[in-house]
Amino acid sequence: MCRIGSIKSKVPVHPSKALHLMLPQQEGHDNSGFAMVMQDLYGTFANYKEKPLLSMACTQKGNQMVEEYMDAHNFVQLAEWIPIPDKRPGLDIQAMPYYVFRNYDFPEHYNELSEEEKQNLLLDTRLALRKLLEEAGEGFVYSFWPDVLTLKEIGDPRDIATYFHLWDDHGGLMAKNIVVQCRQNTNYDIVRYAAHPFFLQGYTLCANGENTFYTKNKEFQKSLHRGYIGFESDSQCFLYTLHYVLHELKWPINYFKHVITPLPFEEIEEREDKEVLKAIRQSLAHLEINGPNTIIATLPDNRMITCCDSKKLRPVVLGQDENMVAISSEVCGLNEIMPGRDREKDIYPNEREVIVIDDELEVQRWKQ
Amino acid sequence: MEAVKTQDVSVNDLSWKIEYHAERCTMCGSCVATCSFKAIEVKTQAQSIVVSTDSQPNPEHRRIARPIISQKASLTDYCRGCGMCEKVCPNNAIRPVRNVDTRQVLLSKDSGPIKRGGRTNLNAQRTLDSIVVGRISQMTDPSLDSARHTFDIRSPLGRVLSPKELPFKLENGKMIMAHKAPPVNWIYPLIFSDMSIGALSTRAWEAVALACAYLNEKCGLPVRMSSGEGGMPVKLMESDYLKYFILQIASGHFGWNRIIKAIPHMVTDPAGVLIKIGQGAKPGDGGLLPAAKVAEHVQAIRGVPKATLSSPPNHQGLYSIEESVQKMHLSLNAAFGFRVPVAIKCAASATSVSVYNNLLRDPYKICGGFFLDGIQGGTGAANEVSLDHTGHPVVSKLRDCYNAAVKQGLQGQIPLYGGGGIGLTGNAAADAFKMICLGANGVFVGKVLIQLLGCVGNEHGRCNSCNTGKCPMGICTQDPRLVKRLDVDKGAQKIVDYVLAFDAELRKLMAPIGNSSLPVGRSDALVSTDKAIADKLGIQYVC
């Protein structure tokens, strides 16, 4: 079982906070990798919040290929953070030669485009870069989106943090939202793309669990959107469903849980909105998730959500204080980073519950 | 010898021979009385016996003439192997035995093609038996407890819209239906297939209907039953129980005069309407009710004289799928105020995917289900050549249809139901589960139900005489003396018990793969020990 966690804070926090959240939970394979998505950035990228930020790991040739592509498509490079790694001997990390975090200015003609058209072009650019590097075997592109940074690597999370100077809290890399996980996918081939969190057009998601409807989900999602690709992990299906329900269908967030874990028919029949719930269940039967899982996600507007499977087979707990809300698979992670919080306010969401936290750290919870 | 010609039929030419033990026979006559095929008769036979009646051995040779039971050497009144004689014999004196040297099929064409009921005798291969549920949840995704967890075992019947087509309107943060969507009923994934009053005796039909109602009212399982072509009793149509029935319309439109007249008096809607285009047992052939079975009540219900009732091979006037959609689907939808799903049943065929694709793309979104009937489906009457030599296995064809929908992202929009041989080897739950994993929303069964009522017909030429009107079990006959043999309540109880076991077994298969709702299209849960089958169905080959 993998542990997942997230932090939402009123003041920007360093990635080390996320590591402190995760490390006490370590068990089994839980030290086989490190992956995080940061959103609402401060430090190096604070002045470029509106500009898309490319996160990738690649070879020198890969970097060149990307630069050429971006030049050819009139993206203008703005800020950049290329970490100078700590290459002390003995670190457990399967490092790539280059890690590139780079802001671009939109090409001039983008200014005339609507927000939606811009979003689509950013996605298409990321997909094109991914394809370019994948075919050449020269690297990985994780996200290309304003105010979002993704870092993923294989190895011991402590050593990965050392490698990237994440323990230094140097102020260059901070965010108000971090979603994090400390292991590689152990079920299938170990590939960097298979590590959670996953990202798509402002939606970030990581999951703890198994998706036993993976085949059904995948077969359906493949035809729903060009961005639903990869499927290196069965958990990507959760992200794609979240994106589909909120971004494509534009349904209120209340309905996401009804899609992934629909109510039993007997319960639906007793509801006032039974016609709508039945219509959702039958039209999106192939997006249902069956199996044990918990998910944590952030939305484009920085809201953070969590919910779990319909049998409550996987754990999750939420802790809060004045400046921070953290979500974690196990409570020991919260105890590490928020030892002084009021533990009576911890929330253990049930199998029908959805929790949403906004930028004011107001925690909303409701039953589906 | 001159009295016998080589062309004469002898008992040894027949498929079944009567094994008779004269020494055990009590001469009660039950076997002769019970044989509805008149295949045996009482004869007098000269016998040479030795008896000793004294206290000391004192053998005495006698020649006597005594009555015995004799099998007729006839191609019309021949033994079907039903075993009723054995069942009624109080002293184990008689039973039918399969004759491996039979020449019957060869010799029986004197009065034209052989007609019979039952299933194919030549294509009883079992694709589903080389598939096992091989993806078992362990460790990280725990198996469920089939007895304790709740399982949501329901399937849609009706046209499902794509999510973008749903008529949702946002009001105060809540979605509401802006207008009606096509009707969808969520039913149990096991449908009692279409067997008409006429093909079945009234008692047999009643037993199946009773079981259906009991499963709904007392067991909470929304099992639905298709009427078959031939209508339904008016009283039933005007009762609340109509909601458990799917009205069938086939090419003969038998029974629809009464159905249409009953519509204004219906207090509830039927569960659906099923347009029968074809049937797996005899694809390309219409329904057939031999005159022998067109009893008075059948004449009344269908509005016909006593004559052989042949439904045409096709719905007259329909020459394309588009037309069938426009004419039949629309008019039947309209007849019930667009509140009742209208589905279609076709024989599995090399062309099924084209038909399914066409229906999926229909702009009216009006087809509420695609029932695919395979070669192993049963029938009350067909030409044997059709039963044994025409048709298409259902498993791969259903999978092809599902995959065709997947390719277009339309899976689930027209629910797929598979039938024809489901439960052929006794376990319908295992068959249903595998079909569901391959993409079916549910299955339909017919033969299994009448087997539970007592039918002894099988795929090795036993009985299969549904067409004769002489069904020894009182199931496929309208002869009141034969019908009386069937106990309606006991028959219904057998079906109820079977479906309850089916339900428990379905959970027993869902639990180990960790699913609480039906794993429609979860082909990853299946593996096959046959490479060719694995490749064809796109599942894992294991050995």
Image (cartoon, coloured by chain):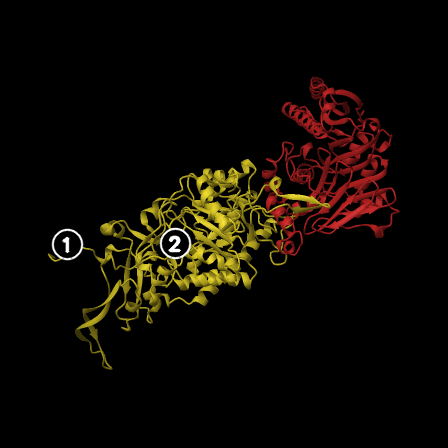
* Residue B3 screen position, x and y as percent: 12, 58
Q: Colour of chain B?
A: yellow
- Residue B309, above or below A186: below
Q: Nearer the viewer, residue B46 or B385?
A: B385
How crowded pointer 1 is (Cα within 10 Å; few <14, some 14-19, many 20+) is rated as few
Q: Nearer the viewer, residue A188 or B370?
A: B370
Q: Quadrant of the N terminus of chain A?
A: top right
Please check whether the numbered discs 1 and 2 fall on a single chain.
yes
Q: Quadrant of residue A173?
A: top right
Q: Nearer the viewer, residue B47 or B388?
A: B388
* Residue A40 screen position, x and y as percent: 81, 33
Q: Quadrant of residue A75?
A: top right
Chain assignment, label 2: B
Q: Residue furthest left?
A: B2
Q: Colour of chain A?
A: red
- Residue B417, above or below A266: above
How crowded pointer 2 is (Cα within 10 Å; few <14, some 14-19, many 20+) is rated as many
* Residue A266 screen position, x and y as percent: 62, 56
Q: Which mark is residue A69?
A: none
Residue tagged by mark 2?
B254
Question: Which of the marked residues, 1 or 2, is nearer the chain's N terminus?
Answer: 1
User: What amino acid type should be assigned to the residue bearing mark 1?
Assistant: Lys
Identify the residue at image location x=51%, y=54%: B271
Residue tagged by mark 1?
B5
Left or right of A174, for residue B273: left
Left or right of B96, for residue A115: right
Q: Residue furthest bottom?
A: B55
Task: Determine the secondary structure under disc 2.
Answer: loop
Chain assignment, label 1: B
User: What amino acid type should be assigned to the residue bearing mark 2?
Assistant: Phe
Between the C-alphas of marks 1 and 2, the distance is: 47 Å
